[in-house]
Amino acid sequence: MKGRVFNFAAGPSMLADEVLDELYEEFYNYQNTGMAVMEMSHRGKDYLKIFEEAKQRLYRVMEIPQEYEVFFMHGGATGQFAAVALNLLKGDKADYILTGNFSKKAAMEAMKYGQVHIAYDGKDNGYRHIPKQEELSFDEDSKYVHLCSNNTIFGTQWKTYPDVKGKILVGDLSSDILSRKIDVSRFGLIYAGAQKNIGIAGISVVIIRKDLIETPMAITPDILSYELMAKHDSMLNTPPTYPIYVLGKVLKWIEESGGLEAIESRNREKAKILYDYLDTQSFYKPHAEKDSRSLMNVTFTTPNEDLDKKFVSEAAERGLVSLKGHRLVGGLRASIYNAMPKEAVKKLVEFMDGFAKENAL
Ligand SMILES: *Cc1c(COP(=O)(O)O)cnc(C)c1O
């Protein structure tokens, strides 16, 4: 497509060309229904087919066991920070592992609805590090352990999930869901905003073990109640119809690309190209510790802020855009989610190498 760039933004982020092509094709007149998907009634049979297919594809692609329910909800991942606490915590205590900004926000939100025990806080190391098992201390009375699988801002990611000693594991997978194969049965609940890796803004996916669906705190807004979501199959009110349709398209693309194994190996290759380069030079400084590095968000800095700025603008001139790091870390960040092609990562490394040579101090 003429004029398109490689968008390294942390989210909303790129969609695969194949997905955009299908959305474009079906835009005005979806499969001869005479309407666009976003004009359809969410109760009509054409839309219900789209909805059901997206849900079934998610079960298939992630190999979600039948003891789990899937909800499509409003309010982004941030809405789930509250929903998790309102539905599961309910005035009791939970463990929160703080590995970055979003896990901290999740903990702050939970504090409104119960007690939070901090099982680990990476603040003192600048959130460069994912804790080892022995660095975690769980509270005896906690009902669940909450973690953030991939720390979008700091560029760290859990390689394997910790042993939570029989407690319920709750995971925010907003920025790495569907980027690799995971064992869903390790979790009591997984949630993710779609706009990073699996679709567009406006929808969050919740995967919950059915036995954990119970009556939430009395003050819970209906729209955040898992009990009502289950009862109404995510259609308590009008669901985010178009984002659910886009999610279905992204899942179809993943299946056609060879499923999660193929996606994961591509993601590993892409990240390796960048990290291998970062490890063989001294101009850029990677932010995350080596064994905590994310396959999704690669964070690094140049020798100073002026050069960071120059990097961002010169990269953009070459069609490599949105490389500015989050204000909490500064520097640069390359988000290389599922839809980012390998050729773009190679192009980025070529640019980085040229920039380093030209600007060596
Ligand atoms: C982006 C992000 C969020 C916030 O998502 P919203 O959908 O904007 O609420 C939460 N957690 C993680 C890990 C994220 O990357």
Image (cartoon, grey):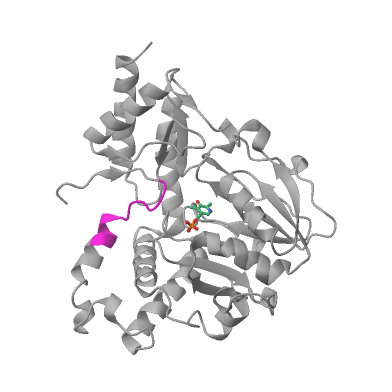
Where in the figure is residue 16, as x and y percent of width and height? 30, 55
125 relative to 59, above or below: above
Where in the figure is residue 296, as x and y percent of width and height? 46, 44
Asked if residue 188 shows in the view, the reply is no
Q: Nearer the viewer, residue 166 or 60?
A: 166
290 relative to 343, above or below: above
User: Who's the residue at 31% across and 25% down the image?
Assistant: 310
347 relative to 39, above or below: above
User: Who's the residue at 79% across and 51% down the image?
Assistant: 138
Which residue appears farthest toward the right when viewing the image?
140
Is residue 19 found inside the magenta-colored segment of the image? yes
28 relative to 185, above or below: below
User: Who's the residue at 61% across and 50% down the image?
Assistant: 103
Q: Nearer the viewer, residue 196 or 68?
A: 196
Where in the figure is residue 157, as x and y percent of width and height? 56, 44
Q: Quadrant of the C terminus?
A: top left
Tell me the magenta residue range: 10-20
Q: Nearer the viewer, residue 123 or 58?
A: 123
Q: Quadrant of residue 85?
A: bottom right
Where in the figure is residue 342, as x and y percent of width and height? 33, 42
Which residue appears farthest toward the top when viewing the image?
361
Most frequent secondary structure within the magenta stretch: loop
Q: Quadrant of residue 78?
A: bottom right
Instruction: Classify residue 347 as left or right of residue 89.
Output: left
Asked if residue 174 shows in the view, the reply is yes
Instruction: Classify residue 108 as left or right of residue 8.
Output: right
User: Who's the residue at 37% across and 45% down the image?
Assistant: 9
Instruction: Classify residue 110 as left or right of residue 239.
Output: right
Is residue 153 found inside the magenta-colored segment of the image? no
